[in-house]
Image (cartoon, rainbow, N blue to C red):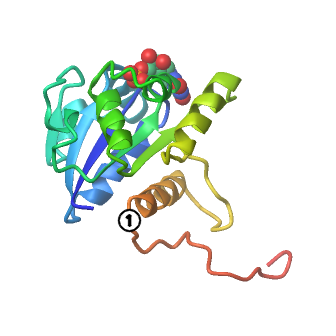
Amino acid sequence: MRSLVVGITGASGAVYGVRLLEVLAPMPVETHLVVSKWGQRTLEHETGRSLDDLRALAERHYAPGDMAALMSSGSAAIDGMVVAPCSARSLAAIACGLSENLIHRAADVMIKEHRPLVLLVRETPLSAIHLENMLKLARLGVTILPPVPAFYGRPESIDAMVDYTVARTLDQVGLRRDSNARWQGGLGRPGE
Ligand SMILES: Cc1cc2nc3c(=O)[nH]c(=O)nc-3n(C[C@H](O)[C@H](O)[C@H](O)COP(=O)(O)O)c2cc1C
């Protein structure tokens, strides 16, 4: 995995995209960032960060309407893609192959080229439409990774919960890192 597209859409949980970029920054991976209009709005609302702050974390960045950008073509040297977070709208567009914007198009390219695509779909509760869209994509080999925390690592902060999901996301694109939250095997006695 040498080059990765990171898409950020307008679902709650912009922090996942931010943290993903922060973790990737020192790694030998070229990051290509695309943020949807509502991804930008939720980023600002939920994290107080600006689009420029986010862009500074990525190697390259693109406007969501730039359909001529590198990752619009399967011939570009892009190895995988993560959408974090992924809204129900973007999920639907990707599931239907609509390619309305650069995030959808880049995802479409990943699917047709059989390259890793991970969607951190965030919505609750999930309707049958959402579930059907996720099932359709899962059957095509897309990883559906809702940002759901695990508690077996006894996380003590929101940061720890976010880091857990980011580590699990990177696992899916072959970028395994050390993480304190990994299950080590064995349970303590009740109450311990
Ligand atoms: C504060 C806020 C939180 C939102 N949270 C979600 C969410 O968790 N999941 C979701 O599917 N849409 C959510 N939405 C709605 C999306 O932003 C909206 O459907 C938008 O059209 C998504 O477009 P995009 O996928 O191009 O970013 C939220 C909107 C706002 C303003």
Q: Is residue 71 above or below residue 58?
A: above
Q: Count up the numbered dots.
A: 1
Q: Is residue 69 above or below residue 186?
A: above
Q: Residues within 10 Å of mark 1 (few under 14, many from 20)?
A: few
Residue 184 quadrant: bottom right
Residue 146 in sight: no
- Of the residues shown, which amino acid type is indicated by label 1? Gly
The C terminus lies in quadrant: bottom right
In front here: 48 or 168? 168
Q: Is residue 85 above or below residue 117?
A: above
Q: Please state the horizontal and vertical placement of residue 76, each as a whole percent of the image.
A: 16, 44
Q: Secondary structure at mark 1?
A: loop
Residue at the image point whose x is 84% and y is 82% from the top: 189
Residue at the image point whose x is 38% and y is 36% from the top: 47
Residue 190 quadrant: bottom right
Residue at the image point whose x is 68% and y is 81% from the top: 185
The N terminus lies in quadrant: bottom left
Residue extending furthest toward the right: 190
Residue 41 in sight: yes
Q: Is residue 188 above or below residue 9?
A: below
Residue at the image point whose x is 17% and y is 32% from the top: 62
Q: Is residue 178 left or right of residue 102?
A: right
Which residue is under mark 1? 174
